Amino acid sequence: MGEDLRAELKGEHVVHLPGRSIRTDMTDEFFTLNFNEPTAPIVRPRLPILHPVINGLYERYGCCRSKNGLFRLVDPAAWQEPYTPWFLMMRDEGEGDVFEGPELYPFMTTAFGSAFVFANLDGEDLVGYVDITTNFNVMGGVRSIFKRTLRDPIFTQYNLHGGLYDELSPVQPPLEPDQCFGFLPPLALGGEATREGVHRVQLREHLDLLAQLTGLPMASRDQVQRHVTPPTAATDCRGSGG
């Protein structure tokens, strides 16, 4: 009996790509634990999602925030532009033969503005994580990235600032879709990741500030406009999704 068939018989979801299959138990378990099942019509992104696992997440949950608000499934096209400097950084740090940058999109952000991303390429399994406070980034397959990040309690507590978020909870009022918690002064300028250093900020402006402070490559407006859909209240995921 093949491994994929055994996984399916055990109730694990398997996504099939040309020449290979992806078991999605890592993603299924994380989202089942952290996100409520929608009780109202879901808000799907307008961008056609080619990544099968990420597309499945949007089909199931749409754009929404997690139960405790630490995570948010976002509209990829609406939020690609402000994260583009990090995507270009990831391109420049790589070998140049994995991705160029414009095909990268955020699919989930944290309350502190960092993003989980995917390559919107047909038949590809690439996802990744970028920390906007340190510029740390990593790319890989779905199972590998989720195991190294979202399924790692140490990573969640410290890298994703989950422990600090617990100190701030319950967050009242909840963060708006265009807000995040930012460290001021920024960590790159000697700020500290403490409760006293956390401030509610506008996410787009904060991303622009951090990109400029750390000298990230900036895309021209023509480059970005070829790939970005302007945000709207609907695609900005203003509902809680649960």
Image (cartoon, rainbow, N blue to C red):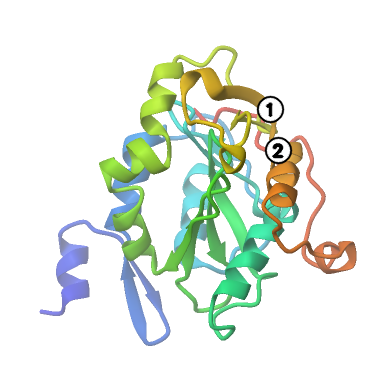
Give the residue pinned by disc 2: 206
User: Can residue 175 be seen in this snapshot?
Assistant: no
Dot label at residue 27 = none
Q: Is residue 105 above or below residue 156?
A: below
Q: Is residue 102 above or below residue 35?
A: below
Q: Position of residue 8 (x, y in %)?
A: 22, 64
Which of the 4 image quarters holds residue 113? top right
Q: Residue at x 79, y 55 (%)?
A: 229
Query: Left or right: where does residue 32 sit relative to residue 9?
Result: right
Q: Earlier in the sequence, mark 2 or mark 1?
A: 1
What is the C-alpha distance between the residues marked 2 and 1? 7 Å
Q: Position of residue 31 (x, y in %)?
A: 38, 43
Q: Secondary structure at mark 1?
A: strand
Query: Left or right: where does residue 160 sit relative to residue 135?
Result: left
Q: Are marks 2 and 1 in contact (CB under 8 Å)?
A: yes
Query: Left or right: where does residue 164 sit relative to residue 40?
Result: left
Residue sitting nearer the eye, 198 or 153? 198
Q: Residue at x 63, y 59 (%)?
A: 86
Dot label at residue 201 = 1
The N terminus, quarter of image: bottom left
- The type of residue carrying mark 1 is Val
Q: Secondary structure at mark 2?
A: helix
Crowding near the residue tagged with mark 1, few <14, some 14–19, many ≥20 C-alpha atoms within 10 Å: some
Q: Position of residue 179 (x, y in %)?
A: 66, 30
Q: Position of residue 158 (x, y in %)?
A: 36, 38
- The type of residue carrying mark 2 is His
Which of the 4 image quarters holds residue 5? bottom left
Which of the 4 image quarters holds residue 34? top left
Q: Is residue 117 above or below residue 167?
A: below
Q: Residue at x 19, y 65 (%)?
A: 7
